[in-house]
Image (cartoon, rainbow, N blue to C red):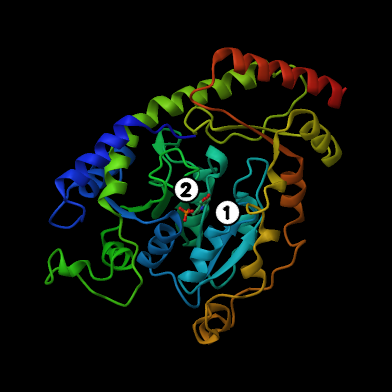
Amino acid sequence: MYRIGREELDAISDVLLSGKVFRYGIGDACQRFEERYGKYLGVKHVMMTSSGTTALTAALIGERIGPGDEVLVPACTYIATAIAVVAAGAIPVIVDVDASLTLDPDAVEAAIGPRTRAMIPVHMWGMVCDMDRLMEIARRRKLLVIEDACQCVGGGYKGRKVGAIGDAGAFSFNYYKNMTAGEGGACVTNNDAAVPRMGCMVDCCKFYWTSREQDESLFISNGSRASEIEGAVLNVQLKRIDPMIRTMRRQKLRILKETADTGLVPLTANSLEFECGTHVGFLMPTIEQANEFQRLTGCTIAGKTGRHVYTEWDPIFAHSGAPHPALNPFKLKENADCRMTYTKDMCAKSLDILNRSLLFGTHPDRKRADVTKLIRTLRTTAKAVLG
Ligand SMILES: Cc1ncc(COP(=O)(O)O)c(C=O)c1O
């Protein structure tokens, strides 16, 4: 979904030619991006990382989630969401999504058990979760909310930027995301108390480069420090994001408007005016009709992407939580009372929705005539498939 080119190349070459390729005390690209992205999101602390997965893990550990805790994750998300929970030492509990393809608030409420400490709402395919309801449940049931905004960089919910609504949030800047440095990520929070642990996960020996007295080296971690090259690219990407999202959102609104009389039922939108608009989705009455629509148009069926459906999360199903059994959260005595039985049909409602959900991507560089062509295809295919 990204645009990338000459400006990024110039920014990278500025970093390389300056020789200032390390972030602490030498270069300023990462520092600058963290400050700018914090302002953009309306959040106090931003820490760049090497990936969205490490950003999620750092966000969870910053909030002191770990062994003994269950974390609710949606049945539809990239496997990294569940993996980050296990990497923090906790156990993921898989919960149904609704027709927005994001966490179903009713299912969340029903899934809360004595060990549940947190939920991870995942804003999927540029669409956003029902944050009002999820935050209300979280506050009432005393759960933490860690937003996975990896697929919704630049997106918002009712005027606020996603990732900055819960207790902490995580973003990915990998190749498939709205802003990219090839790889990269960031975790964010307004919680001052989470910062030392979060920072320790991101760079466990940052204290050598900042202040040894103030910086807490709390524990051993692998670290996932961002490079100045990532910082340089993202500083350019941040300038591009809003106009790109406005264009995609406009395309999506036009497609929805001009197919409104076809019988096609759009996926539930929780904040159509603020989401990213990267995908337009429709819910077919039956799986057979979804398959036929896919055959005729080449669109994506949400349930058939492989990696985004819980049934495909092999290491989670196998309880392969670490490279050595002694480090495996699924085997820890602290987690003995956590729910960790995973079955392929445990979220049958989600599978039904996902296998009936059609996704069409928008693109910032798509010409008006191409959008017109897509609308025409949707109209004729709807007539053929829905009658
Ligand atoms: C929803 C979601 N969460 C987490 C991640 C992990 O991000 P990364 O690949 O940067 O580790 C991704 C990446 O595709 C994702 O889509």
Would you say 93 lies left or right of 55 here?
right
Q: Quadrant of the C terminus?
A: top right
- Measured as percent of width and height from the top left, residue 308 is found at 63, 52
Please state the horizontal and vertical placement of residue 333, each as a whole percent of the image. Answer: 54, 87
> Residue 263 placed where, x, y %?
78, 23
Query: Number of numbered discs present?
Result: 2
Indicate left or right for 346 with 22 as reference.
right
**Is the CB of mark 1 within 8 Å of ligand 1?**
yes
Rendered location of residue 351, percent (x, y): 74, 51
User: Which residue sits at x=48%, y=50%?
Assistant: 135
Q: Give the numbered dot on residue 78.
A: 1
Q: Is mark 2 within 8 Å of ligand 1?
A: yes
> Dot 2: within a 10 Å radius of its alpha carbon, few (fewer than 14), some, or many (20 or more) residues?
many
Q: Is residue 334 above or below residue 383?
A: below
At 45% from the left edge and 24% from the top edge, which residue is drawn? 246
* Residue 154 visible at all: yes
Q: Of 162 and 199, which appears nearest the observer?
A: 199
Question: Residue 218 appears in which quarter of the rendering?
Answer: bottom left
Q: Is residue 285 visible?
A: no
Label 2 secondary element: loop
Tell me if residue 306 comes above or below residue 363 in the rendering: below
211 displayed left or right of 293: left
Of callouts 1 and 2, which one flags the residue occurring earlier in the amino acid sequence? 1
Q: Residue furthest right?
A: 387
Label 1 Cα crowd, 10 Å radius (few <14 / some 14-19 / many 20+): many
Amino acid type shown at disc 2:
Cys
Q: Which residue is mark 2?
A: 150
Residue drawn at x 62%, y 69% is 315
Name the kind of residue labelled 1 in the image.
Answer: Tyr
Determine whether the residue tagged by mark 1 lies in a helix, strand or loop. Answer: loop
